[in-house]
Image (cartoon, grey):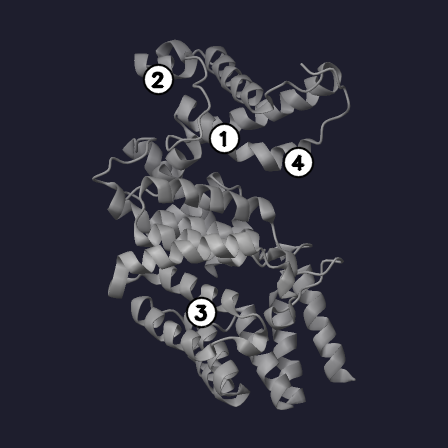
Amino acid sequence: MTAALATPDFDALYRAESRRVLATLIRLLGDFEQAEEALHDAFRAAMEQWPADGVPENPRAWLVSTGRFKDIDKLRRGERFEALDDDAAGRIAAPDAPETEDIEDDRLRLIFTCCHPALNADAQVALTLREVCGLTTEEIARAFLTAVPTIAQRIVRAKAKIRDAKIPYQVPSPEELPERLDSVLRVIYLVFNEGYSASSGDTLTRADLSGEAIRVARLLAQLLPQPEAQGLLALMLLHESRRSARASASGDLITLEEQDRALWDRALIAEGTALIERALASAGAGAGAYALQAAISAVHAEAVTPATTDWAQIVGLYDVLLQREPSPVIELNRAVAVAMRDGPQAGLVLVDALLAQGELRDYRLAHAARADLCRRLGRVADAKAAYERALALTGLAPERRFIERRLAELAA
């Protein structure tokens, strides 16, 4: 134990370590529900003991060991431990496995378990976001544009499927990896998006989530250096390079057009650009959705000023991307690029057509885009209505303040 007896910041510790501890406990205990109970028991014990005894030298290992032995005690009290089969009893009672940062990382094992082909695609993503990254059911529902009860049911059913089908907790073999990659990439990107542009709360970003997504993406790109894995990592690095410029000192949102580009992280841009160049060279005409999105981000990163952005190239890349992965959100992004290339009226026609189709009716960014285009065209009443609709749909405080400022400007 350390000598310092100051009260630990358990909230910060939970945010930093709970998912790592849970992943290892799932490996040791072999069951999601048992591991979650053990995690909570371990943190409860820490809150009782550490203020008096001091924080252990290795808090994560302490939490893992405590959680595991709390589970053993529960099993013994319930007279169930002796009834376990030899493999299960040995797994629970075995000493802690040494920590490692290689491909056998427990969180990577957990991601592949949650993304097993026995689960449908939406359940894979929802379960991984919940168990690996600790997002709430509400946050996942916003990421999916789906009702909260629907997401909750997916998570419960996915856990039951893993238990009943005895899905193994392991990284797939090299032969199985390619077919398992798409779901894992989708999971990682959704995690990054929640960290890069939080769906709710008081801050624009959650650096812990985006950092975790990048860390796991690096591991995956090392394990399977295919163009799409490299493309996803490049995409996230290029987005992450702009983090410092996206909000003011007071936490207010700054649009891409208004950002101080001197604050962009040039090291991340260089790394991301090199990655996407390799990915595109390897994929050729078969470049996938993540690689194409990274190429679009690279064009933005190359522009020294907003006026020098090559919007024609960006629109062309979106055209190819839509052929690879048709999506109303991608169509919306293309419409904004068209507005920058051809003028706000051209973009507004496309945005209105998308909203008329209905899929983006409750998507706040679609209404925000329409509001901005109407504002640029001097259509004040239409801009106000669209901003008010976007305001009603967002739970993120910086976005709300931004929209309220725009509304105030229109009112003036």
Pointer 4: residues within 10 angstroms few (<14), some, or many (20+)? few
Tell me where residue 379 appears, x and y as whole percent: 63, 90
Q: CA distance from mark 4 to mark 1?
A: 16 Å
Mark 4 or mark 1: which comes first in sequence?
4
Give the residue type at disc 1: Leu
Left or right of residue 309, residue 175 in this image: left
Q: Which mark is residue 22?
A: 1
C-alpha separation, residue under disc 2 versus residue under disc 3: 46 Å
Q: As drawn, which residue projects farthest toward the left?
A: 175
The residue where tag 2 is placed is: 88
Q: Which mark is residue 329?
A: 3
**Residue with the mark numbered 4:** 12
Residue 404 in the image: state x and y as whole percent.
72, 72
Task: Report, in whole angstroms, how far the alpha carbon at label 1 lies from the one at label 3.
Answer: 34 Å
Q: Earlier in the sequence, mark 2 or mark 1?
A: 1
Residue at 74% across, 20% down: 51
Q: Characterize the local packing of mark 3: few (<14), some (14-19) or many (20 or more) Cα atoms within 10 angstroms.
A: some
The picture places residue 26, in percent across and down from the top left corner, at 43, 28
